[in-house]
Image: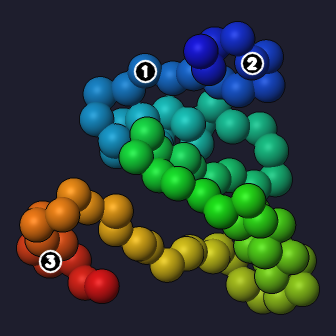
Amino acid sequence: MVQSYKDIKYILGKGSGASYNAGIDAGNGELITFLDYDDFWKKNKLTVQLNYLYQHPEIEYVIAKMRYFLEPGCNIPPGCRE
């Protein structure tokens, strides 16, 4: 499906690290973001992050809170926190 969008580059990597690096190498914009197969973004995620970056030029990157969507009875993976 992603191949049908001309502005999106589809890169098949060898693990997430290699895929991230290939994406960074292939990028040609001012900023870069990643959206993994199991990620869910709120509608205004990029707007909020971009506004913050532009209002604070001394900041080099932003991150977001993480929220788990687990099946009933499943625990949060070890090493992760709520």
The residue tagged 1 is 12
* Residue that carries the numbered disc 2 in the rendered image: 5
Quarter of the figure with the N terminus: top right
Identify the residue at horizontal 77%, vertical 38% (top origin): 28
Nearer-N-terminus badge (3/2): 2
Mark sitting on residue 79: 3
Mark 3: amino acid: Gly
Marker disc for residue 38: none
Query: Which element type, helix, strand or loop, lies under badge 2?
Result: loop
Residue 56 left/right relative to 36:
right
Residue 73 lies, in percent from the top left, at: 11, 66
Amino acid on which the number 1 mark rests in the picture? Leu
Q: In this view, does 33 lie to the left or right of 82?
A: right
Quarter containing the C terminus: bottom left
| Residue at left offset 62%, top offset 20% | 2
Q: Disc 2 and disc 1: Cα gap in Å?
A: 16 Å
